[in-house]
Structures are given as C-alpha cells and as structure tokens.
Amino acid sequence: MLDGPLVADVWTADPSGHVWDDVLYVFTSHDEDTGASDDDDGGHYDMRDYHVIELRDLGGPALDHGPVLHVDDVPWASRQMWAPDAARRGDTYYLVFPARDHEGVFRIGVATSSSPTGPYVAEPEPLAGVGSIDPAVLADHDGSVYLYVGGLQGGQLQRWDGDTYTGVDAYPAPDAPALGPRVARLTDDLLALAEPTREVAITDEAGVPLTQGDPRRFFEGPWVSRIDGVYHLLYSTGSSHTLANATSDSPYGPFTYRGTVLEPVAGWTTHGSFAQVDGRWYLLYHDAQVSGRDHLRNVRIAPLAVHADGRLTADPR
Ligand code: FUB
C-alpha cells in the first residue's frame, strides 16, 4: 500500500485518517469529471459523494466503502462535497463535511452513522456560526473535541467576518498577517459549536505572524494532531503547493511554523492528514500523478518522521 494509490478504480482525494479499534479508516472526497467549468473558484472540483477506505493492514488490501453520503441526501446542500473529516463519540460516527448551500455559500454539515463505513445520515441543517471548507476534527486527550475549518479563494474563508458571511472577498494586504483557519470547541454531541470560532494564528520562530504575501502562509486544509504532547497543525500553502506544519502547546494556537512536510506533488492542490498505525506516524495525502489532471486525484500514504525540533517530514515513494 505504501507504493501506490490506496484505491485505483475511483478517483479519491482529501484523505482524513482515523484509527479506531486497530483499523485505519480513510475518509475521502470522490473526484469525478462531470464537465463542470474550470474557474478560479475550483468549479471543476465537482464532487458529489464521499468514500471511506478501510485498511486492516498497511501491507494488505484497501477496502473501498462508497458512496457513504451523497449530496442528493443532504437537504441544505447543492454541490461540491469537498474535503471531509470524521469523528467517533461512543457508538456514533460523525462525518463532517463542507458543501455549497442553495445560495452557493460553503457551509459545514454533520452526518451520523452507527458504523465508520456508513451509510451516513445528514443533519437537516448545516452547523450554525461557521462556514468555509475543509473541516477537521481533533478529539483531544482530555475529551474536548475541536473543529477547524478554512480555505481561501474558492473555499470562501476571505468572505467570513467571524461567524458572519459577508459575500465580499476581503484579503489582507501582502505585508499584513495572513488569514488563518478558524477553530471552535464542539458540544458533547458534536452537533453544534460550543463557542464562537476564533482565528488560529501562525507565526515564524520569532513569534511574528506569517504575512499574506509569505509563501509559507495558510491556504487551506487545516488538520491538527497531538503528537508526543505537542499540537501539530498541518496545512496546505496553496500556490506554493507544499504541505507545511506548525506547532503549539494549545489547540487554539498560536502555532509556530516548523517547515515543509511534503514537497509539491503532481497537481495544483495538496491536502493531508496524520494517522498513527502500530506506533508509527504516517501522512495521508493525494496527488494527480496518474491522471495528469488537477481535479482527478489519488489518495496515498507515506511514512512520517517526527523530529525533536517540531519538524515533520514525509517520505513518499
Ligand atoms: O478537493 C477540493 C478541495 O481541493 C479541497 O477542499 C481542498 O483542500 C483541495 O484539496
């Protein structure tokens, strides 16, 4: 499995890995060529459903469970089922996902199931008080559960003022602090925010915020894992095409930039997550090497080295 795409018969992207009961579940977007136009807002990323890939052994077969939730079964959603994540609480599994509502605004939805491999049933309304794309859920060691979101440009983060959608693109100046992802704690049932979202700051090693013009700044795909007691924020830098990490002693940040986790891969987007399998850390990521087309991607897995200075580096083959 470490040498090629996890599954080859469907295009998959945006992997979120979770190990539950010794099984690695990878929640993915499902790329399709629907003929939707390639515009500056990523219109050709026109996904309609989600898949879950089950790996009982990294050297063994990957079982594709999909589709586990289709846009037609989400009352508030119209299109573009982008990067999902998942969580477990008790016997309930939660698929957390972004999609455009019927007005074209990206919202964050939740769907539940009694099995990690679905099918999932969507809540009738999206989460209140939060929008944009690329939700990621951190189930912290003390029982708190946090939701991170955010993606610039087509992901509309620049159109949110706190919990209000303005519909206006408001980017910081190139020399001003960059827009960060947003975070909030979830309620115990994971079906609502327990508090207003707040912005996550990412600074350089001197504590100076990365600026909007800095190629290391946040673009999309936030993911947070606690590794050896340290919170690691993984994110895509967008137009510089890397996956980067930053560290903090708090799930709210501020996070200190540590370096490049994954050098640019084939395709415009880059998106990833971490999972610990049998005591070793891995990076799940995607690329467009097989198709040669940005919006038709494959999910892959690579060993991840954890360095004492906070850097994380993936070793793709
Ligand atoms: O897959 C659609 C979008 O592309 C995701 O939401 C982003 O993270 C990028 O991978």
Image (tube, rainbow, N blue to C red):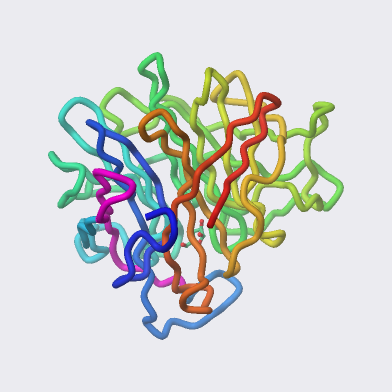
> To which quarter of the image does residue 261 belong?
top right
* Residue 189: image location, x then y, percent: 26, 27
> To which quarter of the image does residue 4 belong?
bottom left
Please indicate whether residue 306 sits to the left or right of residue 88 in the image: right
Quadrant in which the N terminus appears: bottom left
* Residue 316: image location, x then y, percent: 55, 54
Residue 167 lies, with reference to residue 256, above or below; the image says below
Q: Nearer the viewer, residue 63 or 114?
A: 63
Please indicate whether residue 251 sits to the left or right of residue 114 in the image: right
Q: Which residue is drawn at 29% across and 59% down?
A: 50
Residue 58 lies, with reference to residue 31, above or below; the image says above
Q: Is residue 285 within the magenta segment?
A: no
Q: Which residue is drawn at 34% across and 38% down?
A: 18
Q: Which residue is drawn at 27% across and 58% down?
A: 51
Is residue 101 in view from this perspective?
no
Q: Is residue 52 within the magenta segment?
A: yes
Q: Which of 65 and 169 is in front in this view?
A: 65
Q: What residue span does the magenta drawing correspond to?
A: 45-62
